[in-house]
Amino acid sequence: MAAPGAEIQTSLNGSVGTEAAGAPEQQNQQQQQQQAPPPNAWQVIKGVLFRIFIIWAISSWFRRGSAPQDQATPTGAPRPPSRNLFPRDTLMDLHVFLSENEVFTEFNSSAALFWEQRDLVYGDWSSGENGDGCYEQYSEVTIPESVQRNGSFYIHVYLTKSGFHPDPSQKALHRRLATVHTSRMLNKYKRRRFLKTKNLLTGETEADPEMIKRAEDFGPIEVISHWHPNLTINIVDDHTPWVQGSVPPPLDQYVKFDAVSGDYYPILYFNDYWNLQKDYVPVNTSVTSLPLRLSFCPLSLWRWQLYAAQSSRSPWNFLGEDLYEQSDEEQDSVKVALLETNPYLLALTITVSIVHSIFEFLAFKNDIQFWNSRQSLEGLSVRSVIFNVFQSLVVLLYILDNETNFVVQVSVGIGLLIDFWKITKVMDVRLDRENKIAGIFPRLTMKDKSTYVESSTKIYDDMAFKYLSWLLFPLLGCYAVYSLLYLEHKSWYSWVLSMLYGFLLTFGFITMTPQLFINYKLKSVAHLPWRMLTYKALNTFIDDLFAFVIKMPMMYRIGCLRDDIVFFIYLYQRWIYRVDPTRVNEFGTSGEPPVSLPEPEGQASLPAVPNDTSPPKPEEDKKKD
């Protein structure tokens, strides 16, 4: 019996995210068959907009007045505006060092010096090879042994006025107010997860044996150093008279003030926003040298603000890094969309995404209003509501078992709570305190409402699900056998969840058909929540549009198409089962006044009936009548 396989999921600095290569290609193809489709630009933009809305809602709910920043000197006088220590057109020298030490002192080491560029001009946007003020340096970097063994590697950037030296030990050439220093870790640590999978019947796996051995040696999680060959050093062309203590976040963490003069140093910013996660390579003992391309470019204030806002840490990190951060794969999808998508198509995508989010919210609101105000269940499929609870529960358990993003877990959990709430609207739910469970806990009892039992809807609903079971159960059995024979799973519990989830993802639309059957039997569609259905249909049509414009999995396109077919059947039923405004309802009234017939000549007319001036009956009395 072979050892269990290993599915590797790698994430940047501990956040949930990118899958690292390591398992064979065939293993990945098998797992993709049982997992949800990979994210694409359309789905990612919708997810980003949803998260922006959630952040805004929570921030508005818990917003408190921010503590006033210290804008006064120790004597109580207000701080004066500061100035940039490097005026415009200042001549500068750039010194870049690479070292294993976070605190750099090896100024005289030629091996540590990576790049030296002299006579740069602060605020120059026209020099350089391309006439944009940018300079580049490319070289192969020798990787020390400690870095090969998962050690840290730092880049130290010193920017001095021309004629000065960055080494503080050289008293004659070093000036504190003429030297700007910043540093960061050049390599990044990613977390690699090993999820052991195997064929539950044979116990065999097709995973890479080396990955299996690493999983046994390092445990379920391994932290590995990664390297990206590109990095940009931006100097912000800014001379704003900042006041110490009043710089808005997240800019305040980059503007450094001198403690004596009160002025601020030029802002050096490491820009790796466009570094895609797929371009990072792991660093190990087999790697002796790696390429590094450094760019030094000027950056405007407003663009720096955009980059700083994107790279700033989330204010919700108290929940943990895995909870509220976008995955690296989603971030890469947004960046690729920005880089490769036509600007007009990108603007159209963002606009339609906003409209899509509005329709989703309106569909949610009208769905709640419909079930909250519904008094009669005639014509509605109660069994479909119960099945939706089962479907939402399976989806929630599946994403919990696969450690999906926290925002997705919360949204699915809220949807499950709403489905449970609908149960209380379609059934009589109460606690039986007489027949307690184990003599301690009240027993939960549920029974159909009278408006559902006394009508013919229950008969048609049971009939529809009986016919539906003839189709669903054989399909479920076949899919279960296929999943057990040909796919690998972590455990029997994971197999049950993935099997049910894959089945619902493929054949879940069939559960929409009982309502069509009830409409056909009743010859009416007046009982349906048409506002909610309309908003959901509009969203489906938008999905159809982008499913064929943007590259998406074929199953996703088929899913959008089959939902359209079901909705078109609803529309056809609405057309053939039109509402008759002259039909008298159960209260003896109709939507139009009755038309009086002309009296024949010579026929005596009946005496006029006096108008009923009595007050109208309450609704409860009408129902009793």
Image (tube, rainbow, N blue to C red):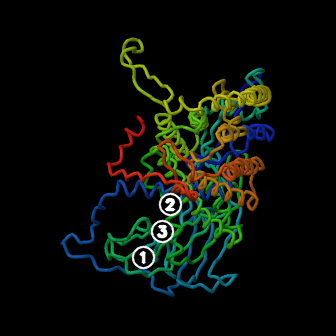
- The answer to whether any part of residue 390 appears in the image is no
Closer-to-camera residue (282/574): 574
Q: Quadrant of the N terminus?
A: top right
Query: Which quarter of the picture shows residue 73?
Result: bottom left
**What residue is shown with label 1?**
175
- Give the residue at x 29% y 61%: 65
* Above or below, 161 relative to 592: below
Q: Could you say where residue 60 lies in the image, as x and y percent from the top left? A: 38, 58
Q: Is residue 322 left or right of residue 60?
A: right
**What residue is shown with label 2?**
104
Label ID, residue 453: none
Q: Is residue 189 left or right of residue 607?
A: right
Amino acid type of the residue tagged 3 in the rendering: His
Alpha-carbon span between mark 3 and mark 1:
12 Å
Alpha-carbon span between mark 1 and mark 2:
17 Å
Q: Could you say where residue 45 lies in the image, as x and y percent from the top left? A: 61, 59
- Give the residue at x 66% y 68%: 346
**What residue is shown with label 3?**
181
